[in-house]
Amino acid sequence: MKNLITLLSVIFIANISFAQIDFYDVDRYGDIAGLEPFFHGVASGDPTSNSVILWTRVTTDSMQAHVKWHIARDTGMTDIVAEGWVVTDGEMDFTVKVDVSGLNPYTTYYYDFYSQDQYSLRGRTKTAPTGDVDALRFGIVSCSNFAHGFFNVYEKLVDRNDIDAIIHLGDYIYEYADGEFGDVRDYEPSTEILNISDYRMRHSYYKLDPQLRRLHQQYPIIATWDDHESANNSWEDGAENHNAGEGDWATRKSASIQAYNEWMPFRKPDATDEERIYRKLSYGNMMDLFMLDTRLYGREEQGQNQNDPNRTLLGTNQYNWLENGLGNSTAKWQVLGQQVMMGPLGLFGNPVNDDQWDGYPAERDKLQQFVIDNNVPNMVVLTGDIHTSWAMDIPMDGYDGNTGANSAGVEFVVTSVTSTSFINFDGLENLIFLANDHIKWANLSKRGYYILNLTETRCQADWYFIDNVLDQNANETYGSSWYTDDGTRHLGEASQATTGDPNNETDYAPEDPRNYSDPVSIENLNELAFIGVHPNPVVENIYLQFFNYDSHNMSLSIFDALGKELINEDLGFRTAGLQNKTINVSTLAAGTYFIVLKTENRSYKKTILKVK
């Protein structure tokens, strides 16, 4: 994505500075201790007509945790339809993923987990329909850079209560170090993430965000990765943001994929292929959703041999799978959830970004011709990555910008949840429209999301924008709406946004876990909630996460199994809020140890296992 930012920044340099703000407002999010041991909340994803993935993570002192899951028809969890036990440990970073089957189609369910005599938050999820359905609605998001501000987009989507699922098109996390791309909020770890411990810790840090936690609690998510889940402008065998001093790329890519598999509620489409994420989800006769990987699975390096007719973005296996799926689809709409802009974007006669499909023109032409030759009637492309909003036709040779003739389909590009684009300046949009008559609308400055509404006759995207991401509870405004009618393959501008059916709205999952009769307040909490340690077992560096409910002086000690203190460190005065600490334990022998955090009044202990 940086290629486009760099090029357009030559035309206009935006100087933006942000004041540092706290990750947590203690008064507002002081309930985190009441979630123990499920600090990271719950999530669901990849719904089918009879199944859904349920997810959580357990923070425990033990080397293994037994976790019971439940799924019910009611918020009180009295009408249980399925339940079972699973075991998790450090090999999967104490995450839990359950593929629950035997459910009814297009039905809202509630679920939770139980371990260590405590219940998790209750989550709400919804299965996909079978057969005919009047309408479907999805919230479309992308590019949630923690360092650029608060996730107000997620908050607004939850408040709607009128959508079937969230579709996240990638850049769910970012790999950068503090200050490298955004300085509103700090990361943990503070350095660029390179190995499995780093990627796990970054995912953990994201999942502790209360706005993201609420989104996952209330909606199932259908997600794919883009580049920042591994490294900026990644491809199959490397990345722009990876150099020789950062180790072997294959090892880093594998670590990023492993952490994503552990921390995200998606269903692996092939148990024998760890790198595959592309998959199809069907929503009755209305939609076949093809979630693609235009980033890691077969993509050749950007900027190389662009006139090669065999050059590939998807890779041979994924491309053939997509052609087969499109050609055999009997759904009304064939929707592609993917990362980078498919429609061309040129200025002064040249493509501006070879990281997009523009860098792989032969494969794009081949796909478009397949769509026409095989009468794929309604290809709709959903795109993220570029931190800006666009509505466009996907033109072929002979395209007519006035009538939309010779368009292979349409593309709706969502802006970012938080990430800044740096490419907005007066006159740029008009310049883009002049040079690209297939592009019907664009907004280059605002953060937000769009609602995708599908019916038998029309597919429409309604854009909504957030006032700012520097403050929580920001207002949103309606932006614009564009649609394609059944069989037309081109866009029209809608006069108003679509609305959801109030009869489809269901009760939210409750804010508190079951048996949570005494809401947590600052006054009745312990001084500190010890959230977690990563990784555990540990080889070299271990990262601590804890939440202070008041400001106090602190110290840290590590003891062996016999009670001998081996490490002691004064942490100084620590303010209220989320805290982090990195400890190097490479000098310790293999064995069991206890990390003890101390305030003036109390101590808090976690068990770790040192290996190698």
Image (cartoon, rainbow, N blue to C red):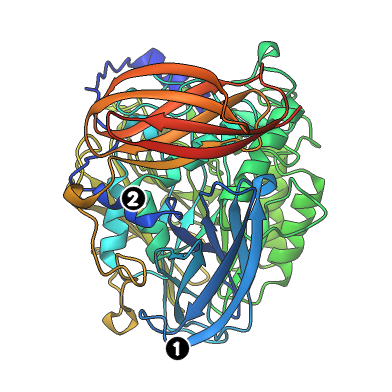
Q: Is 302 left or right of 452, judged from the image as shown?
A: right
- Which numbered tag is attached to residue 33? 2
x and y percent of residue 360 in the render? Answer: 68, 35
For the C terminus, the image quarter is: top right
Residue that carries the numbered disc 1 in the rendered image: 79
Q: 395 or 310, which lies in front? A: 310
- The quarter holding residue 159 reads bottom left
x and y percent of residue 221 in the render? Answer: 49, 60
The answer to whether residue 396 is visible is: no
- Which numbered tag is attached to residue 159? none
Q: Is 146 left or right of 367, judged from the image as shown?
A: left
Which residue sits at x=65%, y=77%?
Answer: 330
Q: 231 or 41, which lies in front? A: 41
x and y percent of residue 2 in the render? Answer: 50, 24
Q: Earlier in the sequence, mark 2 or mark 1?
A: 2
Residue mark closest to the camera, 2 vs 1: 2
- Secondary element type, mark 1: loop
User: Mark 2 is on which residue type?
Assistant: Ala
Count neighbours of disc 2 (C-alpha within 10 A) and say few if under 14, some if 14 to 19, many if 20 or more: many
Which residue sits at x=42%, y=58%?
Answer: 216
x and y percent of residue 496 in the render? Answer: 23, 64
The answer to whether residue 116 is visible is: yes
Q: Is 336 left or right of 532, judged from the image as shown?
A: right
- Secondary element type, mark 2: helix
Q: Residues under labels 2 and 1: Cα distance?
A: 28 Å
- The quarter holding residue 426 reads top left
Count neighbours of disc 1 (C-alpha within 10 A) and say few if under 14, some if 14 to 19, many if 20 or more: some
Q: 87 or 449, which lies in front? A: 87
Q: 442 or 355, which lies in front? A: 355
Which residue sits at x=45%, y=88%?
Answer: 79
User: Mark 1 is on which residue type?
Assistant: Asp
